[in-house]
Amino acid sequence: MKTQILLIAASLCIAALPARSQDLTFTHPSGATATFYGQLNLTYQRVDDGEETNDDFVDNGNSVSRMGFWIDMPLGENKLRMNFETGLGFKTTSETSQLEDADWIDWQRTDLRKFEAVYIANFGSVWIGQGSMATDGVAEIDNSGTSLAGYANLPDMAGGYEFRDGEALSGIVIGDVFKDFDGGRRFRIRYDTPKFSGFMISLAYGEEILAEDDDADYYDVAARYGYESEMFKADAAIGYAWKNSDDDGDSEQVIASTSMVHLPTGLNATFALGDGQDDNGSYGYAKIGWTGQLIAQGSTAVSIDYFDGSDYAVSGSDSKSWGIQAVQAFDDYGLEAYLGYREYEFDDDTGADYQDISALILGARWKF
């Protein structure tokens, strides 16, 4: 009943959307500007663990609902920017499971995504505050246009669900055995070099201040490259991150991804890989897709992807997944409708008989 009520409410909200999203930028006589933005991204989620099927109407963990603002202040030839951004605290596709029925709205301080300042000058950019570490996004470069429905971070779609060993829940959840090791957001200081021939280097040091019981020190470095011509658009990145912790030991990870689009045809390919080091798992990921204009209202994007991982949770384990994605834009409304389907497979050498898990999401994102 609750799901039906939420579906009706979401339909009414979408029906009431303005014909065009507004530019929420306000300018001070000094030249400073404030720009407000946000998005609502609700989705229907259906997960089948081989024995039971669970349906829910939740926030899409691939790109959660959020709101925020930028303040830009010119300082001669340089610029100071400040950003605040928070998630809305809705239950997400990555938080649902067979065992827990979390509150649909439960905002916590970990939903704070960004409160930071950046000074931009000819020597580069210096960031301070809660925000992206140097390797945030390095494993998840994706120019397919379908990341709303599925991308390299597979747990965002149904990460809280447990695999069943026969009919019994095994205690092994999707989120433990399909990690992409991408960098996160922390309270950090970060430096980005100026771009030179499409290249940029980033370095960061950070600490976790929003979650409790995490006294570790986080360090990372990343290199990014971007290229675009009349024929091709390509982006790539590689990063190395390490954590120093007195409580649970040190850890390291190496990640990389690239995504290329042939602009005349819309054909695209995306690849990612990561190694958790010290037997914490490794993987390869590939996606191929197409984007183009099938209807006048906006672009259409479709894709298929495959994930192949090993040594997660248990040495010698295999984590495999395939998925299909489709996204249709409606430009006049700032709206993107999407459909995603994924199969998760896990196996190890313990003799357990894990059943596959399938997940489907169907929803829309509205941005302003």
Image (spheres, grey):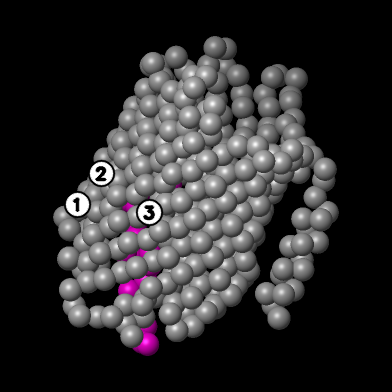
Residue shown at 43% from the left, 29% from the top:
234
Q: Is residue 174 magenta?
A: yes
Towards the viewer: 363 or 240: 363
Between the residue at mark 1 and the residue at mark 2, the CA separation in whole angstroms equals 8 Å
Q: Amino acid at mark 1?
A: Gln
Residue bearing the label numbered 2: 254
Residue shown at 70% from the left, 47% from the top:
335
Between the residue at mark 1 and the residue at mark 3, the CA separation in whole angstroms equals 22 Å
Image spot of residue 1 (x, y percent):
71, 81
**First in sequence: mark 3 vs mark 2:** 2
Does dot 2 land on a helix, a strand or a loop? Answer: strand
The label nearer to you, 3 versus 2, is: 3
**First in sequence: mark 1 vs mark 2:** 2
Image spot of residue 177 (x, y percent):
31, 64
Towards the viewer: 300 or 259: 300
Q: Are marks 1 and 2 in contact (CB under 8 Å)?
A: yes
Query: Magenta segment, which residues?
Result: 167-187
Give neighbour class at mark 3: few <14, some 14-19, many 20+ (Cα, 10 Å). Answer: some
Q: Amino acid at mark 2?
A: Val
Q: Are marks 3 and 2 in contact (CB under 8 Å)?
A: no
Residue 277 bears which disc, if any? 1
Residue 306 bears which disc, if any? 3
Q: Please say whether residue 107 is visible from this viewpoint.
A: no
Q: Amino acid at mark 3?
A: Tyr
**First in sequence: mark 1 vs mark 3:** 1
Q: Are marks 1 and 3 in contact (CB under 8 Å)?
A: no
Towards the viewer: 204 or 153: 153
Does dot 1 land on a helix, a strand or a loop? Answer: loop
Image spot of residue 210 (x, y percent):
45, 55
Image spot of residue 15 (x, y percent):
81, 56
